[in-house]
Amino acid sequence: MEPQNNTKIYWSLINHREWKMYLAATEKGLCFVGSQNKPFDEVTNWAEKVFPGSILEECGEKLQAYAVQITEYLEGKRKSFSIPFDYNGTEFQVAVWKALCNIPYGETKTYSDIAQHIQKPAAVRAVGAAIGKNPVLITVPCHRVVGKDGSLTGFRGGLDMKKQLLELERSCQL
């Protein structure tokens, strides 16, 4: 990936009940949602890999619309997102991330299901790797992907966060 020097990345912290997560966005849209209760280093390390030489600037105002929608989701009041995204990944990764957005709220799919959806049925491992690189947790719902047997599998935010998100969605469907 080419360095995108001087890209300005705005960031803010959502602090909602037990949820503390950093958000980051470029002028194009949301580009990062952090893991629950992780330090700011998670944002800086990600930014250095994806946007080498970028400038991080705290700006709650620029992240307000994103924070509102994520907070509404955490409160069980929102089931989908209407915010712009700035996906930064390979063509394959972006295809996988877009496929994740088609998983209905409260439902789960397997890695094989996603591979089939993007018409690459033999690429199950690559799908798993792409899901693991999803920079926008919650909003691109990689937490809805489970193992073939229904077991919870890897998640950048940790299995506890994944479990909480799935339980939130199940409880809001009742």
Image (spheres, rainbow, N blue to C red):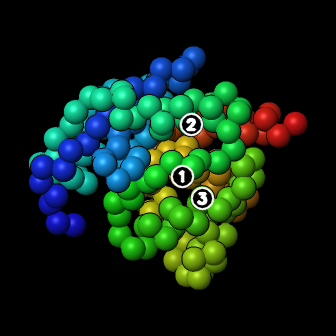
What label does residue 69 carry, if any? 2
Task: Give, as a three-letter code, the residue at label 3.
Answer: Cys
Helix, strand or loop for disc 3: loop
Q: Earlier in the sequence, mark 3 or mark 1?
A: 3
Q: Is residue 24 left or right of residue 164?
A: left
Whole-percent x, y for residue 173 in the image? 82, 40
Is residue 107 visible from the viewing direction of this image? yes
Helix, strand or loop for disc 2: helix
Whole-percent x, y for residue 31 in the image? 37, 49
Q: Is residue 84 left or right of residue 169?
A: left
Residue at image location 35% in from the left, 64% down from the top = 89
The reply to whether the C-beta atoms of the residues labelled 3 and 1 are less than 8 Å apart is: yes
Instruction: Identify the image quadrant of residue 86.
Output: bottom left
Q: Quadrant of the C terminus?
A: top right
Q: Earlier in the sequence, mark 3 or mark 2?
A: 2
Crowding near pointer 1: few (<14 within 10 Å), some, many (20+)? Answer: many
Helix, strand or loop for disc 1: loop
Name the residue carrying label 3. Answer: 101
Residue at image location 71% in from the left, 32% down from the top = 76
Please determine whether, in this image, residue 170 is positioned above or below residue 97: above
Front in this rendered view, residue 57 or 96? 57
Question: How many badges with numbers are in the image?
Answer: 3
Which tag is nearer the camera, tag 2 or tag 1? Answer: 2
Name the residue carrying label 1. Answer: 140
Task: Give, as a three-letter code, the residue at label 2.
Answer: Gln
Task: Give, as a three-letter code, the residue at label 1.
Answer: Val
Q: Is residue 28 left or right of residue 73?
A: left
